[in-house]
């Protein structure tokens, strides 16, 4: 299927979603917010891959929201009494576009080159891991245009790096370089250039794809749950999860494959939409 903002390919159980408007610095226009969740939902719901990698084209990962495409608010204006309700619903739609990455069952790896600006921070922080080129930088740019970031930056970023650093970035709009982002824990690794970045991230994705999908799914589920709940709640949830989801057959296959120095043969995640008729 063809998309306005993305190229999508799937190979060896790894889905590669590429932002593909380099001439616009991959600014997020109206189509972007519809296409990304559609792509992710299709991959996840239909178990088309075991890992998703998101990368980009051109000198920058993304310049963030395409302000020009959204000016005018779809006919709403500041004097219209329905403006607030309209804006509220639009922001929720945009938040859900990135939440699909956090909520999908498989890991999402983000490969960032150049600028990760404004909405790019929202997108990248919704992914499981982030990797960058040496020239990459992050900026909460919204403050520079007189607004508060509202699509996911703060709820997610404050759980990834120290609160004081988040506030500094939010209040100043300054650029955080790749090395600093790695040092504070926002980025897993920094690569010299985009070619080595993609090669490295794809190698990590292949390693993840070689593991038992149900175990990866459970790991993502429990890590995200633990992030948002108390330690006691997390401990209880993992006990309940494994009581119903633990797969001895997959465990035996993983150990046998390791002993025989071969790749394991594991069951894929079931499609989300069951075809069973009850």
Image (cartoon, helix red, strand yellow):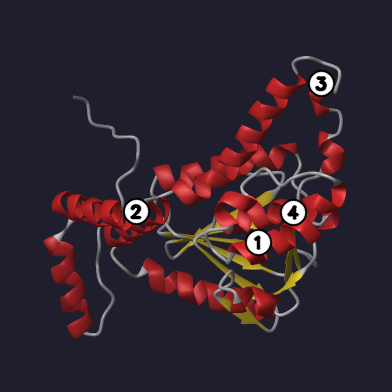
The residue beneath circle 4 is: 118
Of callouts 3 and 4, the N-terminal one? 3
Identify which residue is drawn at 80% across, 24% down: 74
Q: Position of residue 270 (x, y in %)?
A: 29, 46
The residue beneath circle 2 is: 230
Label 1 and label 3: CA atoms lie apart by 32 Å
- The foreground one among 76 and 66 is 76
Label 4 and label 1: CA atoms lie apart by 13 Å
Closer to the observer: label 2 or label 3?
2
Identify which residue is drawn at 64% across, 73% down: 181
The residue beneath circle 1 is: 166
The residue beneath circle 3 is: 76
Label 2 and label 1: CA atoms lie apart by 22 Å
Q: Position of residue 16 (x, y in %)?
A: 56, 60
Of callouts 4 and 1, the N-terminal one? 4
Label 2 close to label 4 by CB (< 8 Å): no
Label 3 and label 4: CA atoms lie apart by 23 Å
Label 4 close to label 1 by CB (< 8 Å): no
Label 2 and label 4: CA atoms lie apart by 30 Å
């Amino acid at each position: 299927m063809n998309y306005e903002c993305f190229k999508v390919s799937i190979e060896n159980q790894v889905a590669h979603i590429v932002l593909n408007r380099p001439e616009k610095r991959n600014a997020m226009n109206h189509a972007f917010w519809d296409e990304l969740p559609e792509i992710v939902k299709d991959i996840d719901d239909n178990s088309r891959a075991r890992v998703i990698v998101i990368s980009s084209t051109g000198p920058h990962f993304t310049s963030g929201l395409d302000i020009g495409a959204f000016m005018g608010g779809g006919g709403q204006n500041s004097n219209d009494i329905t403006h607030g309700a309209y804006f509220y619903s639009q922001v929720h739609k945009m938040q859900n576009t990135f939440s699909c990455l956090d909520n999908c069952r498989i890991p999402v790896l983000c490969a960032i080159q150049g600028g990760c600006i404004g909405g790019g921070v929202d997108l990248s922080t919704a992914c499981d891991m982030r990797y960058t080129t040496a020239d990459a930088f992050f900026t909460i740019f919204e403050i520079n245009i007189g607004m508060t970031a509202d699509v996911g930056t703060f709820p997610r970023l404050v759980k990834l790096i120290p609160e004081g650093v988040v506030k500094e970035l939010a209040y100043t709009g300054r650029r955080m370089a790749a090395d600093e982002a790695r040092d504070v824990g926002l980025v897993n690794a920094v690569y010299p250039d985009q070619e080595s970045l993609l090669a490295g991230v794809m190698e990590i994705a292949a390693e993840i794809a070689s593991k038992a999908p149900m175990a990866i799914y459970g790991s993502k589920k429990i890590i995200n749950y633990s992030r948002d709940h108390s330690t006691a709640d997390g401990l209880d949830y993992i006990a309940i999860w494994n009581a119903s989801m633990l797969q001895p057959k997959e465990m035996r296959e993983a150990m046998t494959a390791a002993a025989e120095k071969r790749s394991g043969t594991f069951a894929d995640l079931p499609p989300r939409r069951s075809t069973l008729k009850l």
